[in-house]
Image (cartoon, helix red, strand yellow):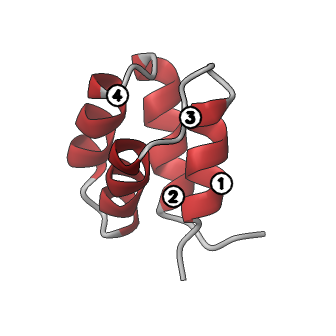
Amino acid sequence: MADIPACTRMAAQTGVAVTEAVTTACQRGVSSDLQGCVNGLTEAGVPSGAANGACRVAAHEPR
């Protein structure tokens, strides 16, 4: 089980609207496609540092 909501929340905290593109990018992080996740989030407007963190969170189980 991965944590897509935590990923989308982290993206939203940067001021980016949680769109389908953000959710899709977070889903890539869940499937261990970290680079695809980061690329998707940065394309959606999330700063790269935040995107990296959000994608790392997506790959882990919710706490």
Q: Residue 40, percent across and down?
A: 27, 38
Q: Which quarter of the image is occupied by the C terminus?
A: bottom right
Question: Residue 10, relative to residue 4: is it above or below?
Answer: above
Question: Residue 6, relative to residue 38: is it above or below?
Answer: below
Check disc 4 and report the residue beneath it: 44
Q: Which mark is residue 58?
A: 2
Q: Which mark is residue 6?
A: 1
Contact? badges 2 and 3 (CB < 8 Å): no
Mark 2 vs mark 3, CA separation in Å: 11 Å
**Which one is nearer the viewer's eye here, 1 or 41?**
41
Q: Nearer the N terminus, badge 2 or badge 3?
A: 3
Contact? badges 1 and 2 (CB < 8 Å): yes
Mark 4: which amino acid?
Answer: Ala
Q: Nearer the N terminus, badge 4 or badge 3?
A: 3
Q: Residue 19, percent across and down?
A: 44, 43
Mark 2: which amino acid?
Answer: Ala
Q: Secondary structure at mark 2?
A: helix
Q: Which mark is residue 11?
A: 3
Mark 3 vs mark 1, CA separation in Å: 9 Å
Contact? badges 4 and 3 (CB < 8 Å): yes
Mark 3: which amino acid?
Answer: Ala
Residue placed at 33% from the left, 55% from the top? Answer: 24
Q: Which mark is residue 40?
A: none
Residue placed at 40% from the left, 66% from the top? Answer: 30
Mark 1 vs mark 2, CA separation in Å: 7 Å
